[in-house]
Image (cartoon, rainbow, N blue to C red):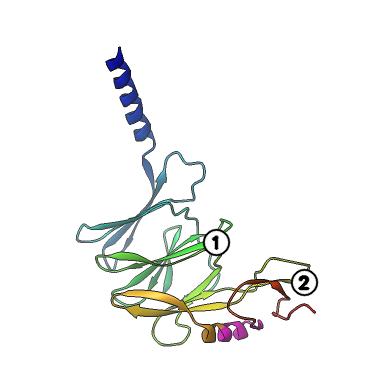
Amino acid sequence: MKIITTLFILFFSIQTKTSEVSQIIESLSIKDKNIKIILSKPKRCDDCGMYEDIKIIFPNGSTKKYTDLTGDKIFLTALDEGGSQLGQYLHLYKMNNETYFLLLMSQSRPDNKVRIIQIESTDAKVIFQENSFTFHQMIDFDKDGLLDLLKKGGRGEPVSTTHSSYDPYLVYKSYKKGKWYTFKLDEKLSQKWSKENKFLWHGPKYNGNIRVDKSGTTLK
């Protein structure tokens, strides 16, 4: 009787795991590099995004997988330099003939999480990950030949019909170390980006104690 019970539990466990395997949401490719990208999520998931996992398959057969992404569709209104929609949920940027940046968002989620995966011919790495980040564009803002990351500002918590908390426009400049890129906040470029948007600069950090109107003018 004990053996039968054990076998039943084992069978039930196998059936459960089988029923919870991932379903493929999209199968994509970067044609220039012959790299495949597969988006998937568990069949049973009450709190999933449009996709949960990304698997990158390289021409040599090696793979990279990123999980628990809670990814959603990307809605971009700004024109990007070298950017293009990849499938329904991703945005792809070409830095040069060897390097691509893959943009992922959880835009419909409260934290507006943004991730950027750098993709090379046989390897990939998450080079940027930030919560509460309102992505605007990835362009060569300072004209040095490298793509920079722009965060839209002026979207602080409303405190009245005309004023909200101070939310700065920010520029993250790209740097290369070895084969990997990184993005670092550049205050000088951020002030320039803020000025171009006719929004007064009060520093690089969100500040709930500074209340501003649409032009960044503080509440008196």
Residue named by callout 1: 112
Please, what is the three-letter code of the amino acid marked with disc 1?
Asn
Location of residue 98 by image quarter: bottom left
In the rendered view, tell whether residue 159 sits above or below residue 14.
Answer: below
Q: Along the line of sight, which residue is nearer the eye, 137 or 187? A: 187
Residue named by callout 2: 162
Residue 79 coordinates in the image, percent (x, y): 51, 75
Residue 106 coordinates in the image, percent (x, y): 51, 58
Location of residue 33 by image quarter: bottom left
Magenta span includes 196 = yes
Residue at (44, 82) in percent of width and height: 140
In the rendered view, tell whether residue 50 sits above or below residue 206.
Answer: above
Mark 1 → mark 2, Cα distance in angstroms: 24 Å
- In the structure shown, which secondary structural element does the residue marked by tag 2 occupy? loop
Write down the region rendered in magenta.
Answer: 191-201
In the rendered view, tell whether residue 41 sits above or below residue 111.
Answer: above
Relative to 51, 160 lies left or right = right
Please, what is the three-letter code of the amino acid marked with disc 2?
Thr
Relative to 201, 39 lies left or right = left
